Amino acid sequence: MTFHAWFECFRGCNVRHRLDQIVYRCELCGGLLEVRHDVKALRQIPPAEWKRLFDSRLGRASGVWSKKEVVLPEVEEKNIVSLGEGNSPLIKSERLAKHLGIDQIHIKQCGTSHTGSFKDLGMTVLVSSVNQIRSRIRAVACASTGDTSAALSAYCAAAGIPAIVFLPKDKVSIAQLIQPVANNAITISIDTDFDGCMRIVQEITKDSSIYLANSMNSLRVEGQKTISFEIVQQLDWQVPDFVIVPGGNLGNVSAIGNGFLLMREMGIIDRLPRIVCAQTDRANPFYRSFREDFVTFEPVTAANTYATAIRIGNPVSFGKAVKALRATNGIVEQATEAELVAACAEVDRFGFFTDPQTGVALAATIKLVKANVISPSSRVIVISTAHGLKFAEFKTKLHQGQLPEADPTLQNNLIQVPPDVAAVRAAINGRIPA
Ligand SMILES: *Cc1c(COP(=O)(O)O)cnc(C)c1O
Ligand SMILES: [Zn+2]
């Protein structure tokens, strides 16, 4: 059985390109391209057979490449650049579900990954694809709020391809900044915001020998959509009711939507979850547009937020995300700084270590449960997009009482005592049952 995929205008213009062509937009309407799969060929295999096949590959190192037929079927094995991405845990917390008043909550830990964010899922596909056309490419470049640059740098270093990353000055965490530096990427800090970096990288990559790695390059979306396949597989091929994901440039929410839609076309599932995109109120153009039924779209200037990875005012994948939300009866919710800080602190008390972006998704979940949009009988999946360790400064400040928005009752202060047993006993007293 052979499978086939190609680029096509996501708005439906009759424009097609091979995946080895260096092209990011439709030449007719200027819209983004998307990767289309030969669904007829995929449907030749019965759903039960797909499930058996994917289950038989569960022990493999890469969750993305164990679903190669629905990701990038024609890439040669020798060109695949993998760092063991995907297969991230789906963690069910009965205690947290009870606390929230819903039947089930599972957190999809996409940050449990090589560079600590879901960006690895897309980057393995993009860099493998570049490897396929290596002789035509001098370098790969991206603008980043921190995690894309870490992923690009790691995969390029693994493949021996030069990487160029543009970061907004003082707007990424120390962990995020040091990752590309360590992987020897050309790391450029620019005194602007993400949207400013995005404009520059689009200029630089007009030279087609410098390949663009932002999610307007739809190859990334192909890897990221395996999140949906993994969730359903991890639920024994059942469909959740809600999938909540923090959104910035809106590539990931589009990818997750595509994953569910493709599974339905393949007959693997027979219904769709409602997809919820969660934005910070400091960078909420998608939320604003949702409130107007998506008839208008106004970019905003993104303001300062703890959720730096979604501080984006002009999301490049807006149109694709609208499509994903319309197809899944989706919702956009927003969260304030105080709400995201509280959600992080609250959920960490159930054994998680949430980053601020996931805090936005959790805050949105809490709001939708309160509003009874998420009903008590629901099975909810929250996408954790990064490892909390990448945001250690944020967590430290939270617990040191340095975040003005933080509720002091959610802080856990470090207790300093002299080396004296009585002093230690006094410190413990009152914190545990007598
Ligand atoms: C990139 C990123 C997001 C946002 O994903 P988009 O595809 O830009 O919407 C959310 N959280 C983290 C941690 C990220 O790195
Ligand atoms: Zn078009």
Image (spheres, rainbow, N blue to C red):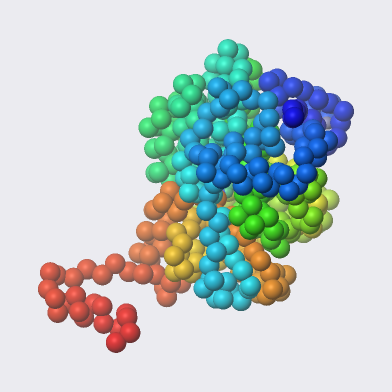
User: How far across and how far down the image is residue 105, in percent?
Assistant: 59, 66
Question: Furthest-left residue in view?
Answer: 420
**Residue 184: quarter of image:** top left
* Above or below, 133 relative to 195: above
Position of the N terminus, as image quadrant, is top right
Question: Furthest-bottom residue in view?
Answer: 434
User: How far across and how far down the image is residue 267, in percent?
Assistant: 79, 48
The residue at 60%/44% (across/down) is 56
Residue 113 seen from this side? yes
**Residue 420: quarter of image:** bottom left
Give left or right: position of 90 versus 408. Answer: right
Give left or right: position of 405 versus 130. Answer: left
User: How far across and how far down the image is residue 106, in percent?
Assistant: 58, 62
Position of the C terminus, as image quadrant, is bottom left
The residue at 65%/20% (across/down) is 206
Residue 279 seen from this side? no
Q: Give the tally of numbered discs.
A: 0
* Above or below, 359 relative to 302: below
The residue at 56%/33% (across/down) is 124
